[in-house]
Amino acid sequence: MTYWLFKSEPDEYSIRDLAAESGRTGRWDGIRNYQARNFLRDSVGVGDGVLFYHSACKVPAVVGTAEVVRGAYPDPAQFDPKSGYFDPKASGDKPRWYCVDIRWQSEFPRPVPLAEIKQNPDLAEMLLVKQGRLSIQPVTAQEWKTILRLGNAIM
DNA sequence: GCCAACGTTGGC
DNA sequence: GCCAACGTTGGC
């Protein structure tokens, strides 16, 4: 059982979009970055915890949690010429990109903004802070706990 | 919309 | 196998 942080642009797919899916379960697809792909394909497993992060928006922040309910399988969009995620170099026996399914778990009463994460000494080692531009990244159990405490804190 | 960080691609 | 060009990501 491990923990992850998944980034999504809320204009594309927000935590409320996930909550609105049937069974509150959605496919996490469209990952087209190799580092993120490798985590997704090799390490993300059923039962893992996910911090849902909104990126490329006014206030980038962790906004809630989700749970992985299906491990890596080839992202169907890469085979679909009509999809924006189509990849001509991928083939059925040699898929290049992967996706997982996650189920909505919670939306924080109070989102935890990136600016606050950067200021918190307990979170200084997060990849989110140390290396930007990584849309799937591991999170330690300590970091998970700290983020949940902040997100659920009564102000 | 600029541009920095990172990984892959491909010419030689 | 070097390395410049390119694609993706995402904060600002």
Image (cartoon, coloured by chain):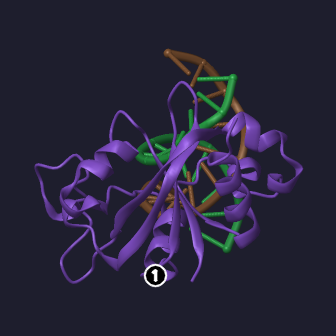
Chain colours: A purple, B brown, C green
Count neighbours of disc 1 (C-alpha within 10 A) and say few if under 14, some if 14 to 19, many if 20 or more: many
Residue A58 occupies which quadrant of the picture? top right
| Residue situated in front as seen by the camera: A138 or A107 | A107
Q: How many circles with numbers are drawn on the protein? A: 1
Query: Residue at left 50%, top 29%?
Result: A57
Which amino acid type is shown beneath numbered disc 1? Gly
Query: Residue at left 39%, top 46%?
Result: A15
Q: Position of residue A138 (x, y in %)?
A: 63, 68
SS at mark 1 in the image: loop
| Residue situated in front as seen by the camera: A125 or A113 | A113
Query: Which chain is disc 1 placed on?
Result: A
| Residue situated in front as seen by the camera: A15 or A13 | A15
Residue that numbered label 1 is attached to:
A45
| Residue situated in front as seen by the camera: A13 or A38 | A13
For residue A24, above or below residue A10? below
Q: Position of residue A143 (x, y in %)?
A: 73, 62
Query: Residue at left 83%, top 52%?
Result: A124
Q: Position of residue A49 (x, y in %)?
A: 52, 70
Q: Position of residue A112 (x, y in %)?
A: 64, 41
Residue projecting furthest to the front: A154
